[in-house]
Image (spheres, rainbow, N blue to C red):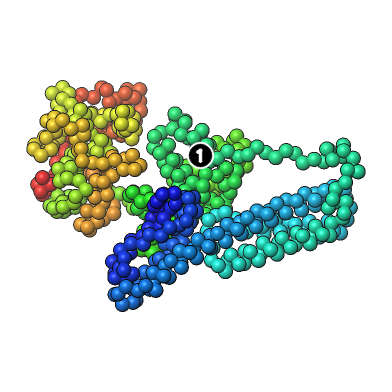
């Protein structure tokens, strides 16, 4: 990981316990000798790979301190910094070469216009085009941030020198009146043939996202949050670039990068650079994100580019037309009684949330069908007595920037009698806390209850429960149980309790939630029953 100590960044990595004795330390901390975070990330990525190889070698040695290994580590640090400095010098050489190409191309254009030296024109124009194409490929390798080996750098340097020599050779063969233009060329002719003024500089990606997505009040909070996450990933990988410079080739690199991310990325508090995260995932054989996740990122960028193409900020949309492997799809389903019994009768020993919070969230999900986010954001003031019936009032809380997923998510849900009997939950007592579950934390993405979600997922895997059942499966279970009840429980009432949009939107059901009595909703909730073994050990 990166640490800013004073004015310079440092690389820090924990030493595996198995090789601590051999290296004589528990962690490695090396100065990256730069104040630039971008350069520090690249150097840290190279050091991460080098130290990994060093650890593997140390595992093969005796368990005693080896000073040679530490000397080698310092050599690796110095070499890493020298390699990057060589890369930067090579980039400067390429920039100079780029200027020479532009000058040569300009002279060739003049040569075409005055129609002289036809044989030289044919030969030189072809060579200039070939040089330009090769240089574009070379420059792309440097700008994408890919780590280069020594051999690759030598090859690129040789290629740059060769191209530079070709340009010098071509220019030396140009007619004198082209190499050193004289004022004898008529002024009107020069003005008539002058190239059009270049287009205005392209705006940055972050500026366009702010203008067309973040500031659009018609966009949902989920759309804005998702787009922000996608833009942040792109900027971390390539920088905040002008949108006209983002090509299909770069979109392909972003595709490969996203497809290599571990499935857990963004769900913790990691601050490692993307390429280091990917290297760790490959080293440990971690599961990577699915095609659906990559597709979602591309869809958000494609939607933004739709605005940019219409307004001529860009010429085409590089994010459309991609194929995504979304066949690896797990069909979610409800819980079986056996799975619920296993969950209920297995002791919760986690420390991320209290036993009261663990059991309370699960039982409320079983007896209400509420979404996890809705349960985690319940406040004490959201438990109300309506027409003599204790109810959960799921509603927006703009003061905390939270609202239900949909408009239909704002609703009244009577509290099941089984929940009222659970003394540790104390739903009807005001203990002075703001939230019903105050020990839940808010993640870096702004989601309350992420600590519970991670704990639930890990606990479920330890029990050997299938991927097809998740916390959201409680909604499937509740929906299935209610739709198999007596005919007097109407479909419209069930949709209201679950926060679903009306399945048939006649004029009489457009505002259906306000017309349904709480007593009818209570009938729906009290129709939920579970075998005793599914709930007896939860509390």
Residue drawn where x is 42% and y is 62% of the image? 48
Between residue 211 and residue 411, name the one nearer to us. 211
Residue drawn where x is 73% and y is 56% of the image? 129
Residue drawn where x is 87% and y is 55% of the image? 175
Asked if residue 467 can be seen in this view, the reply is yes
Between residue 283 and residue 34, name the one nearer to us. 34
Residue 300 as seen in the image, left or right of residue 365: right
Residue 529 as seen in the image, left or right of residue 115: left
In the rendered image, the quadrant that contains the N terminus is bottom left
Q: Residue furthest front?
A: 6
Residue 49 as seen in the image, left or right of residue 24: right
Disc 1 element: helix
Q: Which residue is mark 1?
A: 206
The picture places residue 238, in percent across and down from the top left corner, at 51, 50
Residue drawn where x is 44% and y is 49% of the image? 7
| 459 in relation to 192, above or below | below
Q: Residues within 10 Å of mark 1 (few under 14, many from 20)?
A: some
The picture places residue 418, in percent across and down from the top left corner, at 11, 38
| 418 in relation to 468, above or below | above
């Amino acid at each position: 990981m990166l640490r800013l100590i004073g004015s310079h960044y440092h690389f820090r990595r924990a030493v595996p316990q198995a090789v601590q004795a051999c290296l004589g330390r528990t962690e490695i901390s090396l100065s990256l000798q730069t104040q630039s975070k971008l350069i520090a990330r690249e150097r840290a990525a190279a050091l991460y790979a080098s130290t990994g190889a060093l650890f593997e070698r140390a595992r093969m040695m005796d368990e005693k301190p080896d000073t040679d290994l530490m000397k080698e580590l310092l050599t690796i640090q110095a070499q890493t910094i020298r390699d990057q400095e060589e890369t930067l010098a090579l980039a400067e050489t390429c920039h100079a070469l780029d200027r020479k190409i532009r000058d040569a191309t300009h002279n060739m254009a003049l040569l075409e216009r005055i129609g002289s030296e036809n044989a030289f024109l044919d030969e030189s124009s072809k060579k200039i085009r070939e040089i330009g194409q090769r240089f574009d490929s070379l420059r792309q390798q440097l700008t994408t941030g890919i780590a280069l080996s020594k051999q690759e750098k030598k090859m690129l340097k040789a290629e740059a020198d060769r191209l530079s020599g070709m340009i010098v050779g071509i220019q030396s063969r140009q007619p004198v009146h082209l190499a050193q233009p004289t004022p004898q060329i008529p002024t009107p002719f020069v003005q008539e043939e002058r190239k059009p003024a270049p287009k205005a500089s392209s705006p940055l990606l972050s500026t366009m996202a702010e203008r067309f997505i973040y500031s659009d009040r018609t966009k949902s909070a989920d759309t804005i949050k998702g787009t922000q996450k996608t833009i942040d990933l792109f900027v971390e990988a390539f920088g905040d670039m002008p949108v006209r410079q983002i090509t299909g080739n770069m979109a392909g690199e972003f595709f490969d990068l996203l497809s290599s991310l571990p499935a857990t990325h963004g769900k913790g508090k990691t601050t490692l650079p993307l390429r280091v995260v990917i290297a760790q995932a490959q080293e440990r054989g971690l599961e990577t994100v699915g095609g659906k996740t990559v597709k979602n990122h591309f869809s958000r960028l494609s939607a933004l580019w739709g605005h940019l193409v219409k307004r001529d900020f860009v010429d085409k949309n590089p994010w459309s037309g991609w194929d995504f492997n979304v066949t690896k799809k797990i069909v979610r389903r409800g819980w079986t009684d056996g799975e619920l019994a296993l969950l209920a009768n297995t002791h919760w020993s986690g420390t991320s949330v209290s036993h009261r919070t663990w059991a309370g969230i699960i039982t409320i999900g079983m007896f209400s069908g509420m979404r996890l986010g809705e349960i985690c954001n319940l406040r004490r003031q959201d438990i109300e007595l309506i027409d003599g019936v204790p109810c959960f009032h799921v509603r927006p809380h703009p003061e905390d920037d939270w609202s239900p997923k949909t408009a239909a998510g704002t609703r009244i849900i009577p509290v099941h009698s089984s929940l009222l009997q659970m003394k540790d939950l104390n739903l009807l007592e005001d203990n002075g806390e703001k939230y019903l579950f105050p020990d839940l934390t808010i993640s870096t993405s702004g989601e309350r209850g992420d600590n519970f979600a991670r704990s639930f997922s890990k606990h479920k895997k330890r029990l050997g429960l299938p991927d097809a059942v998740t916390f959201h499966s409680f909604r499937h279970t509740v929906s299935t149980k209610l739709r198999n009840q007596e005919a007097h429980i109407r479909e419209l009432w069930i949709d209201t309790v679950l926060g679903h949009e009306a399945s048939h939107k006649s004029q009489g059901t457009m505002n259906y939630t306000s017309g349904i009595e709480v007593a009818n909703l209570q009938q729906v909730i009290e129709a939920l029953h579970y075998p005793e073994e599914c709930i007896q050990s939860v509390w």
